[in-house]
Amino acid sequence: MSETRDIRVLALWRDDPTEAPMTLDLRIDAQGGVVSTWDVFGVFDLDGANSRPFVLRRDGAIDFGAASPELWRTNLREIAILVNALFTVHWNDADSGDYKIVKIAALGARASSAKVVRALR
C-alpha cells in the first residue's frame, strides 16, 4: 500500500485570483493522486466575509446542498495535486474557469508551524 497524506489545498481562479478562492481537504498518495474515494468537504470564499461550503462528490460534482439547485463540476480528482497544477470548474454547461493550486499544507499541523508541501515528486 502506498503512503498517503491528508492535506489542505488552496486554489485560485486564474481569471481573478481575488474572487472565490477554493479550499478543500483531501487524501493523496505519494504521486499527488487523490485517493479519497469518499465525498469531501470544501468551501469557496466569496468575499472574505461570506463563504459557500460544498461537498465534492466522487464523480466530480460540486454539490452546494438541497437549498441550491446549482450543480457545478470539476476535474480536480483526475489531476495530480501539486502546487501550480491546473484544473477546471464548470459552473454550467457553457461556462467554466481554470483554477490553479497555489498552496498545499499538511493537515493537523499547527498554524505557526504548518509545513507547506512545495512538490510531491
Image (tube, rainbow, N blue to C red):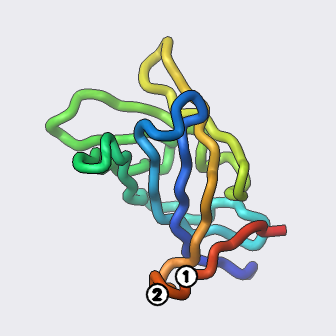
Residue 72: quarter of image: top left
Q: Residue at x 48, y 34 (%)?
A: 73
Assign a secondary structure to mark 1: loop
Alpha carbon separation for disc pair 2 and 1: 5 Å
Query: Which quadrant, please, contains the N terminus?
Result: bottom right
41 relative position to 79: left or right: left
Assign a secondary structure to mark 2: loop
1 relative position to 23: left or right: right
Q: Residue at x 63, y 60 (%)?
A: 34
Closer to the camera in the image, 89 or 45: 45
Q: Residue at x 57, y 77 (%)?
A: 106
Q: Residue 78: percent from the left, percent from the top? A: 66, 46
**Is residue 16 shown above or below 121?**
above
Picture disc at residue 114: 1
Q: Amino acid at mark 1?
A: Ala
Q: Residues within 10 Å of mark 1 (few under 14, many from 20)?
A: few
Q: Residue 7: percent from the left, percent from the top? A: 55, 71
Q: Residue 104: percent from the left, percent from the top? A: 61, 65
Residue 40: quarter of image: bottom left
In the picture as drawn, the residue positioned furthest to the top comes out as: 94
Q: Residue at x 57, y 69 (%)?
A: 27
Picture disc at residue 110: 2
**Is residue 88 shown above or below 77?**
above
**Is residue 60 shown above or below 69?**
below
Q: Are marks 2 and 1 in contact (CB under 8 Å)?
A: yes
